[in-house]
Image (tube, helix red, strand yellow):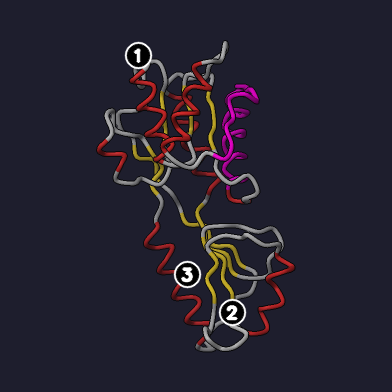
Amino acid sequence: MKHKEVDGIILGTLENEWDQISPFLKYGPILLCNEYHHSADITIIGYDEFEAAYMGVVHLIERGHKKIGFCFDTPYSEAQCQRKEGYLKALQDYNLHHRSEWIFGEMFNIEDGFRVFHKIKDLKDRPSAIFTGNDQVAAGIIKQAMKNGFKVPEDLAVIGFDNQLICQVVTPTITTIDIPVIELGQQAVLKIIESISGNATLNRRIIKLPTKLIIREST
């Protein structure tokens, strides 16, 4: 952008500190998409991560679960922190507790889901349900649970996140959080184009798109 090879940037993640990125604002607009930052003076478009997790955990509670685990991926992500806060608030509102060994970080894919299940299986005090960070992890947990004689959702209920196609091909099908990924991309592109064209400025503004719980067989 400094050399005018691009006119603006949509950041999908923050791998650097904001003070390393902010000097480049003088060369063109920057928009943060699908992530949050507490002090970045730019427009941020993402999902309501807190509400998504809260909604999913309440669903598990309403299914009768009192011991609920939680998976997340990137530990330094503010979006993931908001999701964890939603999980904890749902438990608090229903006077339920969590244990540190029920929370699993840096879990990204199916193989990680295998590992999560085996960690759960080895616990003396196991959660009966788990809210995962994505559908790949959820699929891995379900696969290993079934392989080890667990019934899903009777012995272990599982919620995914993203509503990927894998949710409909795994048996049992996966309850998940549906995210408006197309709308997210469209809004990000439209707003960066408006800024490049001089029709808008990307000042500090947080846009949170709503998510939806898709109930299937895994809960």
Amino acid identity at mark 2: Pro
How far across and how far down the image is residue 2, in percent?
62, 85
**Do the residues bearing badges 2 and 1 touch, measured as CB atoms within 8 Å?**
no
Label 2 to label 1: alpha-carbon separation: 53 Å
Q: Earlier in the sequence, mark 2 or mark 1?
A: 2
Amino acid, disc 3: Ala
User: Seen from this angle, which residue lies furthest right?
Assistant: 19
Q: Is residue 169 left or right of residue 131?
A: left
Give the quadrant of the C terminus.
top left
Q: Secondary structure at mark 1?
A: loop
Q: Which mark is residue 188?
A: 3
**SS at mark 3 in the image:** helix
Specify the amino acid type for callout 1: Gly
Q: Residues within 10 Å of mark 1 (few under 14, many from 20)?
A: few
Closer to the eye: label 2 or 1: 1
Q: Which mark is residue 149?
A: 1
- Which residue is rendered at x = 52% and y = 62% of the image? 12
Is residue 189 placed above or below 124 in the rendered structure?
below
Magenta residue span: 80-106
Q: Which residue is mark 2?
A: 29
Q: Position of residue 33 (x, y in %)?
A: 52, 63
Q: Which residue appears at 40% of the width and 40% of the height?
A: 136
Of residues 199 and 31, which is closer to you in this image?
31
Residue 19 magenta: no
Quarter of the figure that contains the N terminus? bottom right
**Helix, strand or loop at disc 2?**
loop
